[in-house]
Image (tube, rainbow, N blue to C red):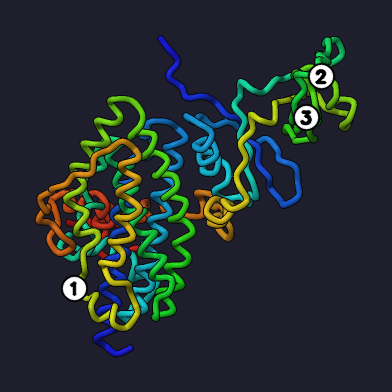
Amino acid sequence: MTDSQLPRYEIFIVERPGRPPTYAGSVHASDDELALLNARDVFARRPDCHGLWAIRAESISSRTAEETLSQAEETDPARREPYLVFGKLGHKGVHTFLGAVEAAGPDEAVGRGRALYRQGVVLWWVAPERCRVASAAEDAGPMFEPAKGKPFRDQAFYPVETLMRQLRRARNHKQERS
Amino acid sequence: MNDEMRRAAAAYVLSLGDDEMILSHRDSEWTGHAPILEEDIAFANIALDEMGHALLWYRLHAELVGEDPEAHPDRLVYRRKAAEFRNTPLVEGPKGDWARSILRQFLFDSAELVRLAELSRSAHAPLAAVARKILTEERYHDRHTRAWVRRLGLGTDESRRRMQRALEELWPLVPDLMGQRPEEALLVAAGICPPADVVQESWEADVIPTVQAAGLRVPTESVPSGFNRFHHTPDLDELLAELQSVARLEPSEAVW
């Protein structure tokens, strides 16, 4: 059987202005535009969101802290391009954008990231910057504005179950009497 | 605002609310059944947004007819018969396949965008305020459904065939979506709502090229459906039978 799933994208979300994008989860989408639209629906409908990044999962290279110690590093200057570096800070942390480096490949990007950015990263993710799609500033209105002022409500907020019980009781009572 | 104008504005606002409410219910039928999980969530979001818009219009209606803004919307949704609903038949038909639901949502959202932009400058300030509030969400719906129209139209042979069929089935319902409502002449003269032909003109200038760019043929002749905001298809009866079934269990008015 062939895999009928659409490509997977990893989604990063800017929760507060000026904060680095952090990992929110995955969506499937046929292309970049729909990945951002789907990400908005799945991750940014209620909480505050000020920006979204989507990166095709296959463009992301992952290295554990241990792996970075033994990896050979590519250094071909002709192949250098900007890479985005994300680090998972601690086992319970989420991947957070740390910054960009110039590298000829993922191993070099991780190596440079490790030299530049903070300690305590247990899992590195790097991806060429060209593989990232970001929500445009002018999209912030239609994409994120509607979520503002809408509280998240637990199902217990709505008295539907209690109400249904009352209705059922009233109906049973009526049937007993007739 | 005199009584006659107030009645006209109430009728207009009721039709806006009913369009949103009935479409919301049809959209909600996709919950758990959409082609992919992400789209399931997206379409459920759209359904919820439309229900929220209906609530805003119904509260404005309550204000215009002097009813309680909390109890009135429930009464409108749960206690009216099909013949009392003023929605356009486009929104009441079955959800059909994904192509049909996407295309219907696109035809509706794109029309809403034009209408709401005009209404946000309405001479009746409370109406303008509701229109502005809804407009932000409709812009997002429009972007989402427009993206899908393009992808399905330019997708596989099957997706194009289904989109073309949906277009041919839904097109005869467009004249009523766009058409002038009986109360409109009075409201237009007072600057409360835009003339129907202004809305239709901007809508066509946007939608026809969009549909054609998606590789679809806009039907040149289509027989008007014969249904309108006052004469509904049997689909609305069937929809209300389900929508109102729980409320009907309890004849007195429960608070939801």
Q: Give the label on residue B182, or none.
A: 1
Determine whether the residue tagged by mark 2 lies in a helix, strand or loop: helix
A117 left or right, relative to B75: right
> What chain does badge 3 belong to?
A
Q: Residues within 10 Å of mark 2 (few under 14, many from 20)?
A: few
From where the camera sits, is residue A169 visible? no
B117 left or right, relative to B3: right
- The residue that mark 3 highlights is A87
Residue sticking out furthest to the bottom: B2
Which amino acid, mark 2? Pro
Q: Give the label on residue A77, or none.
A: 2
> What chain does badge 2 belong to?
A
Which amino acid, mark 1? Pro
> What chain does badge 1 belong to?
B
The quarter of the picture where the N terminus of chain B appears is: bottom left
In x, y percent, where is residue B166? Answer: 23, 39
Task: Decide: is B233 above or below B76.
Answer: above
At a point 36% along the width and 55% down the height, the residue shown is A166
The alpha-carbon separation of the residues under discs 3 and 1 comes to 62 Å
